[in-house]
Image (cartoon, rainbow, N blue to C red):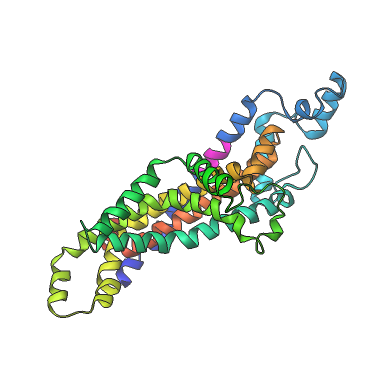
């Protein structure tokens, strides 16, 4: 284990550099795409209120008369120092504007993650330890079914049956104070079901495949013959080897979880960062758009890097390849 830890700092630096490059490319692409949208913040906000001369003055006050490259570099330099600038639409600091919506999104994503990992691991082990059984077939069929249904379709189906027809759960967050979510957890049920079901499905099948593969290995058969207890066999011998390949899939699941949360927020009108992003795009509010992309992109890079590190430590063959 000690030998495996030596290349970790080098691997971490390489992943961090790659992530920073990917984030920069993403920000550039988003900024370029925002420039291709018709009009700018001055046009959208003052289209029917100001004369052409007044619009030019408003564009100057917003800094929109500066060359796009200069504008982007100025924003990027300030963002590196923790200053995301000022909203074109409201004039408020961008950091303050997006803090509240990010907390709502973090609550939804964090709750989904807490449910996702034990659910996927438990279901994968339940199916993998009894391959071909009725339990295995049921779990596999459910995971394939959820994996084949788009997020928004599953959300509409659940709202139709559980909210509209049966009136069991709220269908939307409209009119709900985000601060009251702790006292009204029923509003989180449908968004969490949609988020977790979609991203857990491929992870369940991968854990199942890893368990089946490890169960047939000679050292597991020998441990059984020596009388190693079932709990010890699962926890100490099967789980570490079966979950190693699943860690890489979990990295992709992290990206899917983030995008799934944003889709769920839009469908259920959750007052999270997706709603803020949609409003910013409508207002051509570039500082807000770039700040949201920067924060979500940074989170994705950090999560994927941590998952890479965990998978690296759990997979000796990967460690040998990195040292080589």
> For the point 76% across and 48% down, which residue is it?
93
- Residue 206: give x, y in percent of width and height: 31, 54
- Residue 94: give x, y in percent of width and height: 72, 47
Q: Point out the image quarter for the C terminus.
A: bottom left
- Residue 313: give x, y in percent of width and height: 34, 64
Query: Is 23 one of the magenta-colored residues?
Result: yes
Query: Is 229 one of the magenta-colored residues?
Result: no
| Main SS, magenta residues | helix
Up the image or down, 104 lies above or below 49; here it is below
* Of 159 and 49, the residue lying toward us: 159
Up the image or down, 94 lies above or below 66; here it is below
Up the image or down, 2 lies above or below 267; here it is below
> For the point 83% across and 33% down, which residue is it?
61
Q: Is residue 133 visible?
A: yes
Q: Residue furthest front?
A: 166
* Of 76 and 136, the residue lying toward us: 136
* Of 48 and 10, the residue lying toward us: 48
- Residue 194: give x, y in percent of width and height: 49, 49
Q: Quadrant of residue 234?
A: bottom left
Q: Point out the image quarter for the N terminus.
A: bottom left
> For the point 80% across and 23% down, which residue is it?
47
Q: Is residue 69 left or right of residue 2?
A: right
Q: Is residue 91 left or right of residue 229?
A: right
Q: Residue furthest top?
A: 52
Query: Which span is picked out in magenta?
Result: 22-28
> For the point 62% across and 44% down, which residue is it?
274
Q: Quadrant of residue 235?
A: bottom left
């Amino acid at each position: 284990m000690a030998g495996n830890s030596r290349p970790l700092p080098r691997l971490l630096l390489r992943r961090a550099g790659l992530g920073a490059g990917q984030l920069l490319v993403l920000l550039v692409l988003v900024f370029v795409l925002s420039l291709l949208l018709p009009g700018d913040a001055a046009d959208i906000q003052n289209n029917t209120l100001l004369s052409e001369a007044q619009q030019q003055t408003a564009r100057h006050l917003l800094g929109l008369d500066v060359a796009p490259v200069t504008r982007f570099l100025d924003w990027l330099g300030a963002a590196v120092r923790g200053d995301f600038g000022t909203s074109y639409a409201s004039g408020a600091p961008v950091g303050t504007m997006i803090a509240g919506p990010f907390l709502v999104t973090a609550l939804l994503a964090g709750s989904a993650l807490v449910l996702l990992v034990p659910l996927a691991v438990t279901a994968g082990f339940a199916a993998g330890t009894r391959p071909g059984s009725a339990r295995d077939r049921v779990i596999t069929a459910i995971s394939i079914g959820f994996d084949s249904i788009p997020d928004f379709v599953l959300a509409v189906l659940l709202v139709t049956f559980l909210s509209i027809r049966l009136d069991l759960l709220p269908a939307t967050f409209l009119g709900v104070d985000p601060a009251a979510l702790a006292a009204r957890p029923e509003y989180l049920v449908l968004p969490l079901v949609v988020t977790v079901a979609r991203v857990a499905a491929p992870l369940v099948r991968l854990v199942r495949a890893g368990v089946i593969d490890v169960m047939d290995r000679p050292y597991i058969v020998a441990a059984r013959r020596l009388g190693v207890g079932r709990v010890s066999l699962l926890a100490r011998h099967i789980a570490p080897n079966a979950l190693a390949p699943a860690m890489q899939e979990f990295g992709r699941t992290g990206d899917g979880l983030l995008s799934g949360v944003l889709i769920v927020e839009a469908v259920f009108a959750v007052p999270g960062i997706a709603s803020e992003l949609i409003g910013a795009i409508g207002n051509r509010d570039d500082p807000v758009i770039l700040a949201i992309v920067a924060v979500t992109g940074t989170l994705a890079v950090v999560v994927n890097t941590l998952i890479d590190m965990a998978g690296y430590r759990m997979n000796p063959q990967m460690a040998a390849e990195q040292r080589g």
